Amino acid sequence: MPEKVLMKGNEAIAEAAILAGCRHYFGYPITPQTEVAAYMSKRMPKIGGTFLQAESEIAAINMVYGVASTGKRAMTSSSSPGIALKCEGISYLAGADLPALIVNVQRGGPGLGGIQPSQSDYFLATRGPGHGDFHVLVLAPASVQEMADLTFKAFELADKYRMPAMLLADGTMGQMMEPVVLPAPAEHFIEKPWAVTGTECKRPHNIANSLFLLPEVLERMNFERFERYARVEEEEPMWESFLMEDAEICLVSFGITARVSRNAIVQARKEGLKAGMIRPKTLWPFPKKPLLEAAGKVKSFISVELSMGQMREDVELAVRCQKPVYLCNRTGGMIPTPEEVLQSIRKANEEGG
Amino acid sequence: MAKLTFKEELCKGCGLCVTACPKDILALSKTRLNSKGHAPVEQTDPEKCIGCAFCAMMCPDCVITVER
Amino acid sequence: MVVFEKPKSLTDIPMHYCPGCTHGIIHRLVAEAIDTLGIEGKTIGIAPVGCSVMAYDYFACDMIEAAHGRAPAIATGVKRSLPENIVFTYQGDGDLASIGLCETVSTAARGENITIIFVNNAIYGMTGGQMAPTSLIGQVTQTSPYGRDPKTAGYPIQICELLATLEAPAYLERVTVNNVKNIRNAKKAIEKAFRYQLEGKGFSLIEVLSSCPTNWGMTPQKALEWIDEKMIPQYPLGVFRDKEA
């Protein structure tokens, strides 16, 4: 039996990253993710790794870019306003086809916003966080166990597809304590012949680069990258279905709101309301297939989220507007109660599809 | 006896080597252009070259190889 | 016997710089230092955004292209990942002294064991000659058409002097490449900076006063004279820090 340990969400991210072979962490203090940095500052020196408190979020992501160029696993973590600053570097990572992990423990915005939980970086994360045509993998944990598992998975996927990955958590997930079974240390790593490690005068020089001045070359790079993204969309969507066999109302929710929704669904079932949930574990690639399938069976969808309907747009696109997609949301750091979600299930039931 | 070799196609005709030459035996061609349209540098009196390599040191484009 | 030729650490790709631009000389001096120390196989260079953006094509060692101003942060990541390798950045004045000043100062303050080659030509070359943080008082550029006025545009930033206020840097020197004698000095300085890194002495930065005939609106030869007449009085040559001296 693997041992269960009680951990905070933010610490589970940090330990799972180390188990995934990440030995280079660069960060800048910002609430509510500072435990990741604090944990790394304790652990990294003991295992011969790097913890470096950078001069800015921008510097931190570029330090990650440096390590990623050398073919090693590297990460940074921050919260919403800090992630906005990192967008420059994330775009360059994507443009140079470099894998790395960016953890976003979201807080409310816009602007300085607040420090309470939020999911309002949904667009920022899923539409390509930075300038230009690109995507990052977006993984959305809903438990401390998944904070660990999806961090581990994010490194693997990032290497496999040579692209940055973002773990999209929120303040509640970061602070929550739950028992966790940590993953076994990673043993197999993909070869990276493209890495910038010094030629040893044995091969032509490698260049980590996102500059392509010839339009036809840049276009080809973009087309090729999106062919790779198409494979990701085909092969990598992850989701969990909950009571969907006979569901008439399908809730769609991730992270902390998925946990609230689960409670509400159990309550609704007691009232005879056939509610179920599709919980995306990846937001990009978005689990379009199960949602489209569900559209043929259910009467309506409810997007339960901590933002102003950002995910609802993806649900509507996924179900091709075949059924109504209602919104149950709070923002600014507020979290809906199970009763509030139950109310929207009742309302959806009355309005039908 | 010194010998200069010019990778003429790389020459941009900036003339920095011409001014650097202590023997004043370099000049930009008055009769020829390279494929980029620059008048390349030429030695006017190779016999006088002392192989000091000042020209090569001033050249931003590594046009000149110096042998002695 | 060959007494002077293109160093091995430069590729055969023709450089795109304007005629008479001294970037090419500085590239060659960096490559000569790499050759002399026999470190081509373990050197990783980082190119900036600016005229030398395509330096990654010209150096034969492994290269990384950085976002504007971020080369020192990338160099930090590379060096932490591969401490046995030799890491250098090659940056212009807009890149290093304006948009990337935070990274420059912080990397120097940490004493990262890397080498920065800072090319100061007092202008933004690639974008067509705008005012730089290092443009001289009164210097006419595309964005200071009446000359740099300190009342509205402030004063030139002297990077070596600025960094010399920090504890950590091991070696800071300002050189230029406007004549053979100065090129020889610059060559020594650049080689020494790389040697210091090899010896683990810590952060080094060599500021090289460079010419921009095109955007200064001068002949290549006149531009070299302008370095003597105008730039050196504002940016005196010399050693600003040498932990071995």
Image (cartoon, coloured by chain):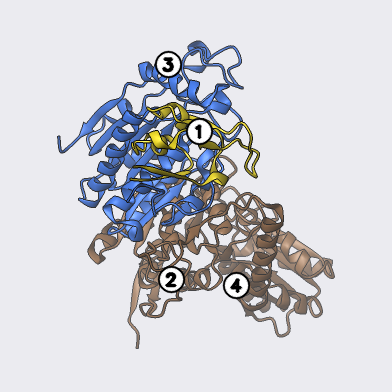
User: Pointer 2: what residue?
Assistant: A148
User: Pointer 1: what residue?
Assistant: C21
Q: Chain of mark 2?
A: A
The answer as to whether the residues below labels 1 and 3 share one chain is yes
Q: Quadrant of residue A9?
A: bottom left
| Residue type for callout 1 | Cys
For this rendering, which residue is in front, C3 or C70? Answer: C3
* Tag 1 near tag 2, CB within 8 Å: no
Q: In the rendered image, what is the letter of the chain coloured brown?
A: A
Q: Which label sits in the foreground, 4 or 1? A: 1
* Tag 4 near tag 3, CB within 8 Å: no
For mark 4, give the secondary structure.
helix
The answer as to whether the residues below labels 4 and 2 share one chain is yes
The answer to whether residue C177 is above or below residue C42 is above
The answer as to whether the residues below labels 4 and 3 share one chain is no
Q: What x and y, as percent, mark residue C135?
A: 48, 21
Q: How far apart are the alpha carbons under marks 4 and 1?
A: 67 Å
